[in-house]
Every structure is written in structure tokens, then in C-alpha cells.
Image: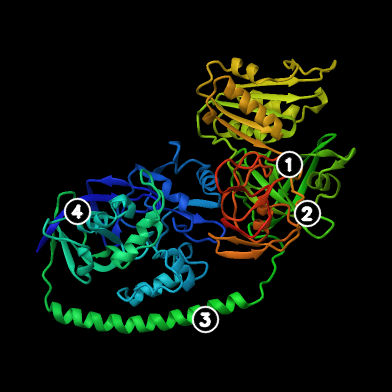
């Protein structure tokens, strides 16, 4: 029985990223050999990451720069290019590729090629998914019926219980997945605004069904064979749909009603999984035939009996797993030595750069090689306090991104005037006065969005004041090693000549970077004015005129909040597009004194945790980190807005000098504290 033709064929070079359409594909025993040859690994858990765990992956596009060799051997020896939502691209052979992806996702991840099937470790789950996690991933409520896994073979069920994907491949369940135009047309008729298109579901191929076929016809093909040209595939199971097709993808808007519509009107099934029965090539336009079934009624009877028995076994297993999950939640938690995501580092070197700046080198005693970072990023230190708590402070890395045995930061002793008295910063003061070589400190691996990708050739304009120069040290050293021809201007302002930190380093960098121009401004000069410097304050007008024409530069601004805002606004006033400007700010603690120590309840919806507020915490950000909840952050001073999250309910307070976010129901985690019970999308 002819049911239609092949309308589209898709391959996805990187698991969970958008793929590319092709006119033909070679089917092998484990599916398309050129499909999902790469994946993202969550370095914290060691697991293969998916769009369900890291939804931002769904917005990335991947394509091959060089075709993989045929077969399912290790790595497939391919080169790929990944395109970000802003149009920028990186290649898989960029030494900073994993660091750039970590910066984009806000998690420490690595880009990896497909290991051989015999190497099972990369495919293993850190721990099996609990029944509640399965329901959460599938977008189900707690009291919904169990999802139907009864058509999965016992071998598949055993694999899913231990591995993120079957060893030797990066597909989820079965080697192939297809969908029909009849099924998509049916769903579009039910919910026209949903845009039920093949791209939402990322199939291996799309079957354009005969006009006489209506409804979700693939649901009726369970256990049947399809002939596509010379290829024969077995339809294993209707695809159980999770919530991911409702998320935003390239060219597709976010619509959470899409998965709900599938759940309500299609029993959560759309499309079908399949397994190749032979090796052959399929092409767009090939006819698709439903192979006649010998003893079909008898097969269906045995299949139904087997599914019922398997459903009972799975149901019993789920009840046991749910009981164990509840018992685990009731067990007292063991308090970690430091928050999740932080590791114990040792200070291996300390160097005084000036009267009020010290450089510190940190080494992880458990890792010989540290994660590479994108120059400009920072690490977060959990600095102990006299009351037994911690304050969390971000410090820009001043070492190059490729230096992988230590991390270096350069810290200025910060002071502030409170009630007429000079007060030393709780973070910088402790680092200057208490921390010695050999001491240990809890450190979070590099993060933040303020960075410059070394392989990018866009001309750079770096603007800083005082200690704000530290991330630019990292950027310039990294460029000297990986892209020395890139055009870079550094505009730096200081008060006195003796405030010029890293003078010798900059002299050396100018010799290694032929297109680097350093513009130093000294606002309170004396007789020792550095050669080539300008007496007076740096202004946006001077920067704009120096770079004329300036519409092709990328600007990075680093300084205290008032400085960063003044230069951001000043450069915009000079006609520079705001999209070219990126800034980071720093300052002393911004904790609000709300006076109310009520034990509010804080619910983080994405993490599915409800917790009691700890009044000792400086902010919602430090509170989340202390509970092991991942949250994006940058300046931690309310300026860069990297920590902005959605506030679903409740009220918060901010310090007087912090401008609350303009968006409705938004909260700056780094500087907000609760005024009531809260519900936050995090």
C-alpha cells in the first residue's frame, strides 16, 4: 500500500541544535551516519546534555564544514560550524569552542564528538531519572496517567535506565524518527496558531502522505514495515512528545500550548520512532509503501498481550521508584562544604601590583587542567566572614584564557565612606589582609557574558578606569597567543601615574600585537607622566573621534557603575549603536537593609524547589547559589542585568542606588531581597 513520498530529509550535526535539510541520506543499522555526530556534555554531571536540560541549545544552528566519513566509527572525523542567535559563528576546531558554548548556556559544558560504542562511560547517566523528573520533562501533571512506554523493548527500557543515549550514538531512543504531513495537518486544524511544522519536531524525514490519509496515521503503523526506495524500516513506537517542541527555535516562536495540544488531542503521541532493517540510501521524492503484514491480526494480538504485561511491570517499577524518591526527599540532606558549582582552590602565588592592588593565582589540587574560559569572564569567590557565613564576589580573570593550570585575579582594596568613616570592602579587604599562599578558598569556575571571543576579527575598543582594566589584560594576552593581527584600541583612565598597574605587561603586549593601540588618560598628572599618555579626563567624545568611522567596532566598557553608564550613554549620544556596546561594572556590597527578617518562602519553579529565605544572605542570587541553584550573573552590582529573572509572584526590595529592571515582572537577583513570599522562574 503506497502511503506517500519523502518530502524532507533532515540531519542534525549536533544533538539538540537545529540542523540542515539534505536531498539524500545513507541509512545504516544505527540510523543516518551523519546525524548527531557531535553533542554537548554537561561537565558538572558528566552527562550528555539535551535541550530539555539546557533549553538555550535549541536556538543554536549547526552545519557541517567538512562531511563526516561514513559509518559509526569514533568521532566520524567531521568539522562543524555553530551559529548563535546574533549571527556569530564558531567552528568545532576553535580552541575556545567549549568555553564560548559555556558562556552562552551559563553552564560549564564541552563540545564532544561521538565516542565509540565500546566506550560506554560518556553515555552513562549520572543517576536515573526519577518518575517526577520524567513527568516534568514530558510536561505532565503529577496526577496524569503514566506515559505509555509499553511498546519499548525490554532492551530499550534497560538502556534508557542507564544511559542518556544508546552507547555509540547520540539519538534518544531509536535510530530514526519520522512524522507525516497528515499528522501535522491534523494538529494545525485543531490549533492553527501553533505552527505545527516539521522543524518543531526535528525528524529524520517527513512523509508527505496520500490525500486520502487523514489523522495521525503513523500511530496505526506500530510494528509495521515501511519501504522507502530500497530501504526498509520498522515502525517501533509512536513518539512520546515532551515539552521541548513548544520552546523557541530558530524561526519558530515559543508556544507552550503546542505540547499541551498534542497531549490533549493526540494522547501525547506525534510522529513515530523507527529502526532500519537494511542499509540503503533514501532520497527526497522516494515513494513510501506500507509493507503488507503476514499474520497481521495474530501479530497484533500477541503485541497487545505483551504490551499489557509490560505495562503492569513498568507500573510496579514506577510505584517502587516513586516511593524511593519520596523517601530520599524525607532523608536529612548532608550539608556540603561549599555551594554546588564551587570547588576548593588553593592560593599558589601572591604578588603586590601596587599599593592597593594584589594579584592572586589559584590552582585546583584535584585537576591538572582547568576549564578554558573566554577572556573577559570572571570567577566567583565564596569569601568567609566572621559570622560563619560567606559573601560572594566576582573578580575578572587577568590571566589569558588558554592558561589552563591556574586562574589569576587582580584585586583592588575597595573602600567606602559610611557615616563619615572609611570602611574597607568585606570581600577585597579579606583577600588583601587574610588570604595567604597555601590557603584554600571556594571558587566557582569562570562565567559571565562580558568577554571577547579571540577568533572573532571584529575590531575591539576596550574602555576602562582603574582596576576595570583587569579583564582587558586577559583579552590582550589571549589575542597575542591566538589572533595577534586583530585591531584593538584600549582607552584607560587613571588618576595618578602611580595608579598605572601592569605597566610592564602592557609594554610587552604592544610588541606582540601589531594592531594594538593604547590610549592612557591621567586626570591628575604630575612630573612622572607616562610616555604617550594624555593629561586630563577621558571622554566619550575623544573615543568616538579617535575611532572614526566607528560603526564596525565592538565596545567593551569596564568600571564602576557610574563610569560604565556615563560612557555607555555618552557613546550612544555620539551616534554609536547601543548594540555595539557591552559593559560590566563592579563595586562594594549592595545588600539592601530591608529590616524585615521574616522567614519568607522562595519557590524556584524551574528547579522545582521551595526554600526558606535566609536573612543572612546578601541577595536572592547568593541565596540561590548557596542552595546549589544555577543562576547567570555578571557584575553582581545591578548594572549589567545578566542575572535578570522572571518574578512570577511576590515583592522584592532594592538598595537606593540600584535601578530596578524596566520589564514587567522582572527581578535583578544580584541586588534584590524578598519583601514577601516569592515565585521565581529559575
- The residue that label 2 is drawn on is 595
User: Are discs 3 and 1 less than 8 Å apart at CB?
Assistant: no
- The residue that label 1 is drawn on is 656
Label whose residue precedes the other's in the sequence (3 or 4): 4
**Identity of the residue drawn at 72% across and 42% down:** 409
Q: Nearer the viewer, mark 3 or mark 4?
A: 3
How packed is label 4: few (under 14 Cα within 10 Å), some, or many (20 or more)?
A: many
Q: Is residue 299 left or right of residue 84?
A: left
Label whose residue precedes the other's in the sequence (1 or 2): 2
Quadrant for the C terminus, please. bottom right
Instruction: Indicate which disc residue 282 carries.
Output: 4
How packed is label 2: few (under 14 Cα within 10 Å), some, or many (20 or more)?
A: few
Label whose residue precedes the other's in the sequence (3 or 2): 3
Considering depth in this image, is 397 or 145 the residue closer to the camera? Answer: 145
**Identity of the residue drawn at 32% across and 76% down:** 150
Instruction: Indicate which disc residue 465 carries.
Output: none
Q: Is residue 663 visible?
A: yes
Q: Nearer the viewer, mark 1 or mark 4?
A: 1
The Cα atoms of the two marked residues, 4 and 2, are separated by 69 Å
Amino acid at each position: 500500500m503506497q502511503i506517500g513520498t519523502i518530502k524532507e530529509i533532515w540531519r542534525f550535526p549536533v544533538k539538540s541544535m537545529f540542523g540542515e535539510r539534505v536531498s539524500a541520506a545513507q541509512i545504516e543499522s544505527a540510523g543516518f551516519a551523519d546525524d548527531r555526530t557531535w553533542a554537548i556534555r554537561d561537565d558538572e554531571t558528566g552527562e550528555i546534555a539535551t535541550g530539555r536540560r539546557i533549553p538555550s541549545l535549541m536556538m543554536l544552528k549547526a552545519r557541517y564544514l567538512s562531511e563526516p566519513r561514513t559509518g559509526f566509527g569514533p568521532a566520524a572525523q567531521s568539522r562543524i560550524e555553530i551559529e548563535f542567535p546574533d549571527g556569530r559563528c564558531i567552528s568545532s576546531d576553535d580552541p575556545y569552542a567549549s568555553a564560548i558554548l559555556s558562556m552562552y548556556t551559563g553552564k560549564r559544558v564541552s563540545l564532544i564528538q561521538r565516542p565509540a560504542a565500546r566506550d560506554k562511560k560518556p553515555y552513562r547517566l549520572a543517576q536515573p531519572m526519577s518518575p517526577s523528573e520524567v513527568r516534568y520533562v514530558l510536561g505532565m501533571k503529577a496526577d496524569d496517567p503514566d506515559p505509555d512506554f509499553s511498546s519499548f523493548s525490554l532492551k530499550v527500557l534497560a538502556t534508557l535506565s542507564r544511559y542518556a543515549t544508546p552507547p555509540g550514538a547520540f539519538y534518544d531512543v531509536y535510530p530514526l524518527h519520522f512524522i507525516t504531513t497528515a499528522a501535522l495537518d491534523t494538529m494545525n486544524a485543531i490549533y492553527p496558531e501553533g505552527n505545527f511544522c516539521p522543524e518543531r519536531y526535528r525528524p529524520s524525514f517527513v512523509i508527505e502522505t496520500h490525500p486520502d490519509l487523514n489523522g495521525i496515521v503513523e500511530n496505526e503503523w506500530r510494528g509495521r514495515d515501511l519501504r522507502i526506495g530500497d530501504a526498509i524500516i520498522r515502525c517501533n513506537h509512536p513518539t512520546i512528545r515532551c515539552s521541548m517542541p513548544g520552546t523557541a527555535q530558530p524561526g519558530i516562536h515559543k508556544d507552550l500550548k503546542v505540547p499541551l495540544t498534542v497531549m490533549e488531542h493526540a494522547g501525547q503521541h506525534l510522529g513515530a520512532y523507527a529502526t532500519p532493517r537494511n542499509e540503503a540510501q533514501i532520497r527526497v521524492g522516494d515513494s513510501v509503501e506500507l509493507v503488507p503484514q503476514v499474520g497481521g491480526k495474530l501479530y497484533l494480538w500477541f503485541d497487545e498481550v505483551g504490551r499489557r504485561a509490560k505495562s503492569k511491570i513498568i507500573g510496579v517499577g514506577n510505584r517502587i521508584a516513586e516511593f524511593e524518591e519520596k523517601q530520599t526527599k524525607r532523608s536529612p540532606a548532608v550539608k556540603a562544604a561549599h555551594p554546588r558549582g564551587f570547588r576548593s582552590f588553593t592560593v599558589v602565588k601572591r604578588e603586590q601590583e601596587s599599593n592597593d592592588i594584589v594579584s592572586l593565582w589559584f590552582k585546583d589540587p584535584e585537576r591538572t587542567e582547568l576549564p578554558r574560559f573566554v577572556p573577559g569572564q570572571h570567577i566567583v569567590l565564596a569569601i568567609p566572614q566572621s559570622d560563619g557565613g560567606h559573601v560572594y564576589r566576582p573578580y575578572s580573570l587577568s590571566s589569558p584564557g588558554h592558561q589552563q593550570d591556574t586562574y589569576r585575579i587582580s584585586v583592588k582594596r575597595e573602600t567606602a565612606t559610611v557615616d563619615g568613616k572609611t570602611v574597607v570592602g568585606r570581600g577585597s579587604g579579606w583577600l588583601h589582609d587574610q588570604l595567604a599562599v597555601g590557603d584554600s578558598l571556594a571558587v566557582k569556575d569562570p562565567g559571565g557574558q562580558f568577554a571577547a571571543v579571540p577568533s572573532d576579527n571584529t575590531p575591539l575598543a576596550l574602555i576602562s578606569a582603574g582596576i576595570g582594566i583587569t579583564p582587558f589584560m586577559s583579552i590582550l594576552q589571549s589575542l597575542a597567543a591566538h589572533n595577534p593581527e586583530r585591531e584593538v584600541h584600549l582607552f584607560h583612565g587613571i588618576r595618578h601615574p602611580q595608579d598605572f598597574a601592569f605597566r610592564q605587561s602592557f609594554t610587552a603586549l604592544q610588541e606582540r600585537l601589531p594592531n594594538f593601540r593604547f590610549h592612557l588618560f591621567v586626570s591628575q598628572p604630575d612630573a612622572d607622566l607616562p610616555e604617550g599618555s594624555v593629561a586630563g579626563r577621558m571622554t566619550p567624545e575623544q573615543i568616538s573621534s579617535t575611532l572614526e568611522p566607528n560603526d564596525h567596532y565592538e565596545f567593551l566598557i569596564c568600571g564602576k557603575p557610574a563610569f560604565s553608564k556615563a560612557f555607555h550613554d555618552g557613546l550612544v549620544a555620539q551616534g554609536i549603536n547601543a548594540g555595539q556596546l557591552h559593559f560590566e561594572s563592579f563595586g562594594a556590597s549592595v545588600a539592601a537593609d530591608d529590616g524585615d527578617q521574616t522567614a519568607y518562602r522562595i519557590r524556584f519553579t524551574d528547579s522545582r524547589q521551595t526554600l526558606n529565605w535566609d536573612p543572612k544572605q546578601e541577595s536572592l542570587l547568593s541565596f540561590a547559589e548557596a542552595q546549589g541553584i544555577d543562576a547567570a550573573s555578571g557584575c553582581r552590582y545591578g548594572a549589567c542585568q545578566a542575572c535578570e529573572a522572571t518574578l512570577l509572584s511576590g515583592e522584592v526590595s532594592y538598595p537606593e542606588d540600584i535601578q530596578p529592571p524596566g520589564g514587567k515582572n522582572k527581578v535583578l537577583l544580584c541586588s534584590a531581597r524578598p519583601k514577601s513570599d516569592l515565585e521565581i522562574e529559575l
